[in-house]
Image (cartoon, rainbow, N blue to C red):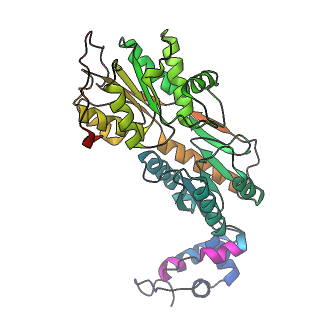
Amino acid sequence: MKPGKTGRARSGASLIDVAKAAGVSTATAGRVLGGYGYASEPAAERVRSAARALGYRPNRLARGLITGRTQTIGVVASDIASPFYAAVIRGVADAVQNRGFGVLVTNSDERLALEQQAVRLLLEKQVDGIIIAPCDLQSSEHLTEALESGCPIVQIDRAAPNLQTDSIAVDNVGAARACVRCLTDAGHRRIGFVGEVLLDGAVDLDGAIRRCAGLRPDERGVVPSVLRFTGYLAGCHDAGIAPDPNLIRRLGVYSAAAARAAVLDLMTGPRPPTALFTADGAMSTGALEAIGALGVDVPGDLSLICFDDLDWMQFYARGVSAASQPAREIGALAADLLLRRIEGDRDPVRHIVLPVAIVARRSVAPPRRARPRATKIGAGHD
């Protein structure tokens, strides 16, 4: 069938059909539609016109056998249900869709075994590169093997220090420090902290405070919650406030339920905080559940600022102030760096740290002089 004879596109057209309709060899048609090699512009236009008329869909597997590429990249997210990673993945997809690449998304659930399985799957699918938020910054042999096999990698959110790859993170320390400054500027001195603060080895709270207080803002090989705790400590130090272990809840687990229990404990203690800083979206969600269960008014009874600006925060009561990560920008930059590596970029690895905006709403106010102690809720609500 010649192009232009009918408006209907024939389904199941092959490369041979396109070449015949365009009056060129199959090899020429393959080069034009595959985006490799040379073809004159008149011949290329005939091939593209024929492909459109016939409804031709390229066989990426066959093209991969010729070019050594599958035009796909893989993403290993820590939690695809997280609004942060959903936005990152959207940024990746937006960046690659106009460059002829597809995206395969997998989930590690912050478990090393699942991450290793996800990386193996993506390598079996012969992706051209991988974007990953590694869940274990010390056990990265599987990523080293992927690099040695010729698969470029970009790390996001956190980075294993022994991997020579591009990485993109945010200024966790600076943003957390700015969050605490918002609270101290309002007059708060008793500022609570709730976060995972995952550290290697059995480290008690005093040890965690000493270790985190000594970290550099640009420290690599450290998970974000630890850097945010470092920023919290720095913000307290800026205001001349000594760390109070009674106001700190280091959970050691990424769990909204654990955060809820921690905030219930904080707010029903003998000297509850007048302000609270939560280290991520899960911690914030659990904190708001506890605050609601206790009937604590924000900001009347408790000022609140959170790391991660979740959609619901702008609608909650008077709105919740938050550190807003540029998640889509992280995804777009990661995709761009990865595509550059796939295309042969051999420049030194880049470690990009993005600033974090503080979104001020109305969840922060000066502390009351006298504040009633929250009443413990029934055991059935714990």
Q: Quadrant of the C terminus?
A: top left
Q: Residue at x 73, y 50 (%)?
A: 345
**Does the rendering let one see residue 42?**
no
> Would residue 282 appear left or right of 24 to someone viewing this image?
left
Closer-to-camera residue (65/353): 353
Q: Height in image: 348 above or below 319?
A: below
Give the farthest residue toward the bottom: 1
| Place of residue 202 in the rendered image (x, y in percent of width and height, measured from the top left) | 61, 35
Q: Within the image, what quadrant is residue 204 found in?
A: top right
Q: Height in image: 197 above or below 81?
A: above
Magenta span: helix, strand or loop, mainly? Answer: helix
Q: Within the image, what quadrant is residue 256 found in?
A: top left
| Place of residue 31 in the rendered image (x, y in percent of width and height, measured from the top left) | 67, 73
**Does the rendering let one see residue 85?**
yes
Q: Residue at x 69, y 68 (%)?
A: 36
> Would residue 187 appear left or right of 228 to someone viewing this image?
left
In magenta segment, residue 64: yes
Q: Height in image: 79 above or below 238?
A: below
Closer-to-camera residue (246/184): 246
Q: How many marks?
A: 0
| Place of residue 237 in the rendered image (x, y in percent of width and height, measured from the top left) | 52, 13
Closer-to-camera residue (355/11): 355
Residue interval drawn in magenta: 51-65
Q: Height in image: 34 above or below 11?
A: above
Q: Residue at x 60, y 35 (%)?
A: 199
In magenta segment, residue 92: no
| Place of residue 298 in the rendered image (x, y in percent of width and height, measured from the top left) | 26, 26
